Amino acid sequence: MRFKAHQIAQLLEGVVEGNPDVEVWRICKIEEGISGGLSFLANPKYASFIYDTEASVVLVNHNFTADKPVKTTLIRVKDAYTAFTHILELCQNQWVENKKGIEEPCFIASTAKIGQNTYIGAFSYVGNEVKIGNNVKIFPSCYIGDNTIIQDNTIVYAGVKIYPYSVIGRNCILHSGCVVGSDGFGFAPQTDGSYKKIPQIGNVIIEDYVEIGANTTIDRATLGSTYIRSGVKLDNLIQVAHNVEIGSHTVIAAQTGISGSTKIGKYCMIGGQVGIVGHIKIADGTQIGAQSGISNDIETPKTAWRGSPAQPYRKQLRTEVLWRKLPEIYQEIQDLKQEIKKLQS
């Protein structure tokens, strides 16, 4: 579809600077701008490209000041990055919204309840007593286990596996290959050295506006529920163990592992490859740097941590400075030992 600059400005509550009737029909990077393209400038690092870009329209912040004439049409908005994100959402939604109906072959149990305007892709399985809300999109080759609830406007991409009794809230996105409700890692050691499996009879509850990345796994609780609270964003390849609770609007980057029964607060930011032991609590607003190891409670809200084992961010930076100097410090100690030997002799 084609849109004129003034139509986009109206949508984004922006102001056109240039030709209000110029048309765009594709999205592009500012450094790779092409005629008919819509781009944006938010990072000052890319400011030089705005003078030469071939993009027909560029979104900029209200306070952007050009150092020389700009040939492209600008749309000034409050936050160019957020505005461009909104445009991308509209493009993606158009593709998703076109998916309607139930494709064949797929299996839908007679006791399942399917809402209006729902899409279920081919080779998907919908079990007994499943409840699927309105405008839900389930892409091909998905497994929806018995007694699962998926609420309105949620998107389940291809190959997702949702175990029985799981609850998925409204406006969630589950990316390909993620698994919700698999067994928690519970085994009781026996006197002969073997391990006996502990049945995992709880479930997973995911609240509204949660996004789960590809190949992320969320284990169901041994008893009770594993909770992913509203607004949580999980990257790809994350392991969430049984009985974990992740507070609202926390974001976690790829390859992080969270052990059982750990409680993570609200508005936390956790970097990639972080390891978190079980049965601890992490306070609201905590920031944890990539590859950190968290082995104890973090009790003070809005603090930053880094390292393995983790320690307060600034202390860890000082530790790293000393660590880099270890070879020189070691050599100085060896030299001092030689001097002491000489004095003793």
Image (spheres, rainbow, N blue to C red):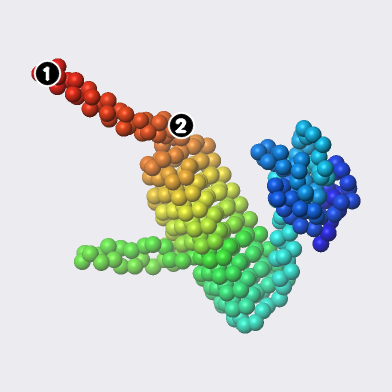
Res 304 seen here: yes
Residue 221 percent across, percent down from the top left? 45, 61
- Indicate the secondary structure of the residue bearing disc 1: helix
285 vs 153, left or right, is left
Measured as percent of width and height from the top left, residue 229 is found at 56, 53
Q: In this view, does 254 lie to the left or right of 150?
A: left
Q: Where is mark 1, residue-wise? A: 344
On screen, residue 345 versus residue 172, left or right, reads left
Q: Residue 339's image quarter?
A: top left
Please identify, in this view, whether the residue under mark 2 or under mark 1 is nearer the observer.
Answer: 1
Identity of the residue drawn at 83% across and 47% down:
9
The residue sitting at 82% across, 43% down in the picture is 71
CB under 8 Å between callouts 2 and 1?
Answer: no
Distance (Cα) linking label 2 and label 1: 42 Å
- Say which amino acid is labelled 1: Gln
Q: In this view, does 120 lie above or below 67?
A: below
- Quarter containing the N terminus: bottom right
- Determine the residue positioned at 55% across, 73% down: 143
Which residue position is annotated with label 2? Answer: 314
